[in-house]
Image (tube, rainbow, N blue to C red):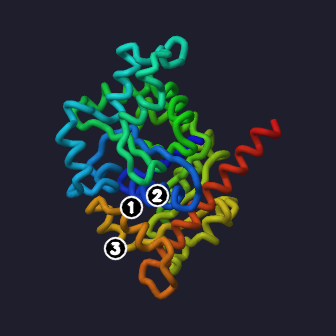
Amino acid sequence: MKIAFWSNAKGSIGVTSNLACISVASVMRYSLKAVLWENHSQRNTLEQALLCKHTNHYLNEVDNYHIHPVGMTHLMNQFAFGKYSISTHKFNTQPDYPKRQAIQEASYEILNERLYYIPTSFEVNRELYDYDLYSNVNLILQSLDTFADLIYIDTSNKNSLSSKVILEEADVVVVNLNQSPSLIQDFFENYSSIQSKCIFLISSYQKQSCFNINSISKLHSINKSQIAIIPYNQEYQEAVSQGTIVEFMSRNYTCKRKNPNYNFVNQVKKAVEMIMHHINYMEQQEAAQ
């Protein structure tokens, strides 16, 4: 199941940090396997948010990069050098290089053989990298679909070729918004082609705002079950900057109401349930056709 996290906002709106905590919470809640990747290089990456740079695991991976390269570029190179037959969309039958091994080698393991991350290289030209992704993105999505139950994609809001394909091919698009009326209006005016598979995530939500869930739901005829919120949480933002999101979520996942992180974690759990409910709904719709 392909889940694209995306926003029509021009600036930073928390797409990466929202995807990170929700993906971790989803594999903690369900017996599912998930893989994460992003179709663009950026200053604040999933890698920085999820992999503590001070752990021995991370340092060993970096030190051995020239021996055991990882990342989406490495995976695409397997396509280019014949490890994968693009014309037939089948991996070569060589027993030493099956499909799962290729994806596993390109990934960092984030959480207990359940959550994997395929990083993006900063050493390549962004335009060329996007073109390479565009040429291979359908192949990548098909391959990842056989590797994991859930594919989370941090999708660029720039006018990139690969983003257009990802938004078209995604089973669910999680639209990240804030409580700006103009931003929400822009989405409904300009992105009608994907609205049928969209659910909405409101970042840094303020309940006191006059533009709250009730007003957003009423104004744009969105069922409130399709809207989740992510409140601002200082400790979580520190975890994002330190690369310790897994530790933060593990420590707080079952916290009680008195815990200052309870509301944040509880809303993340609700967002996970919204996504899973929408996935089930989309699967039922597809089965009925």
Taking depth in this image into account, of 162 and 247 the one nearest to the observer is: 247
Task: Inspect the image, locate mark 3, and give the three-letter code of the amino acid beneath it.
Answer: Glu
Disc 1 target residue? 246
Dot 3 or dot 2, earlier in sequence: 2
SS class, disc 3: helix
Task: Inspect the image, locate mark 2, and give the three-letter code of the amino acid beneath it.
Answer: Val
Which label belongs to residue 132?
none
For mark 2, does the 10 Å Cα neighbourhood hold few (<14), some (14 to 19), or many (20 or more) residues? many
* Image quadrant occupied by the C terminus: top right
Residue 135 visible in the current orientation? no
Give me the residue at 67% from left, 53% from top: 278
* Image quadrant occupied by the N terminus: top right
**Residues under numbered marks 2 and 1 in contact, where contact means CB atoms less than 8 Å apart:** yes
Residue 188: x, y in percent? 59, 50
Disc 3 target residue? 235
Give me the residue at 67% from left, 59% from top: 222
Q: Is residue 78 above or below residue 18?
A: above
For mark 3, does the 10 Å Cα neighbourhood hold few (<14), some (14 to 19), or many (20 or more) residues? few
Dot 3 or dot 1, earlier in sequence: 3
SS class, disc 1: helix
SS class, disc 2: helix
**Residues under numbered marks 3 and 1 in contact, where contact means CB atoms less than 8 Å apart:** no
Task: Inspect the image, locate mark 1, and give the three-letter code of the amino acid beneath it.
Answer: Val
Disc 2 target residue? 24
